Amino acid sequence: MSARHPAVVASTADLLAVAESIAERWHEVGATGHLLARNIDTGDELGFDVDTAVPLASVAKVPLALVVLDRIATGAFDPALPVTIDPAAKSVGPTGVAAFRYPATLAVADLVHQSLTVSDNASADALFDLVGVDAVDERLRAWGCAGIRIRHRMHRMYECAAGVAGDDFGLALELAIRDDAGGQHAIETLDPAHANVGSAAALVDLLQRVWLDRISEPAATAELRRLMALQVFTQRLSSDLRADTVRVSGKTGTFLHLRHEIGVVASESGDRIAVAALTRSHRRASIAHDIDLAIGAAARSAFESLRR
């Protein structure tokens, strides 16, 4: 489907109109998008282009964290096990241990915390090294998460971008946008056939199962919910939902032209709306506040429309 004519899903005619309005707004700000919002308890939902596999960027840290927390909950991993990250071999990134200049030792449970709260690539890749990328993917298969594939560490994204653009981030961004339109990807980790990918529908299904304790172990899902509520980034899902009576538990994903967030919006009255908002920008800009705000506006519209 084209950006102007997405495949819309909605439980009612009123929700259909909301989904169409959000899709049109995303098109206006220059983003191709995939959205699904679902009331976890009633099943009512709205969205568009929900089954498209999209490279996840740091959203992949959510299923990674769940697999690690599952192993902790079942006794396979000691949460206090120390892991030392060497700056000479660590993954790159602007936050957490990825930005450290000296060796750092963190417990496994703290690596999960860093991965989710500040989206630390080095901590996430230390967990990938501990568990194994293939083992994470296999565990998702066993849990029935068919629409999510985990194929590489976080650092692989930067290796692939540097392989075609060197240190020129602007060129890598330009190539990402060009290739998105053409369907042939010079940067391997932006190719859905090789990237960590998920659809909006699969990600909302995962969130729903986590929030209802219908996957993994209750101790693991409870800890994942706790950590997602501590995420420090508020420029997307939370941007239009900041209130004492609303909590957003989320995880962003950002790389080149990708701007994502998945999460659950919960109110004091008991409403729980799972949201997956996955976008790809059409323009060469490393900062796009209008797209971030459009994601926030979409989350608010969906929340207000789906709450009971």
Image (cartoon, helix red, strand yellow):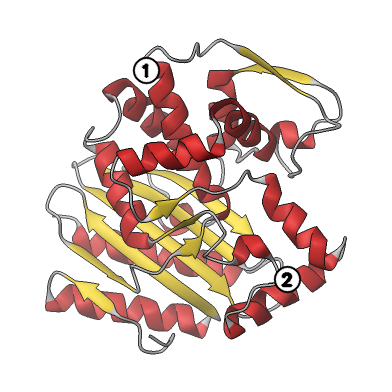
Q: Quadrant of residue 302?
A: bottom left
Tell me which numbered mark, 2 or 1, is placed earlier along the sequence. 1
Residue at x 60% of width, y 47% of height: 152
In the image, residue 290 sits, relative to residue 40, either above or below, namely below
Residue 231 visible at all:
no
Q: How many numbered markers are drawn?
A: 2
Tag nearer the camera, 2 or 1: 1
> Where does label 2 land, which residue?
173
In the image, residue 86 sits, relative to residue 206, either above or below, namely above
Please state, as top left, top right, bottom left or bottom right, where the N terminus lies in the image: bottom left
* Secondary structure beneath label 2: helix
The residues tagged by marks 2 and 1 sit, at their Cα atoms, a distance apart of: 40 Å
Q: Position of residue 203 (x, y in %)?
A: 36, 53
Q: Amino acid at mark 2?
A: Leu
**Who is closer to the viewer here, 247 or 286?**
286
Residue at x 74% of width, y 36% of height: 98
Q: Position of residue 12 (x, y in %)?
A: 12, 73
Dot label at residue 73: 1
In-image side of 186 versus 202 (left or right):
right
Residue 292 visible at all:
yes
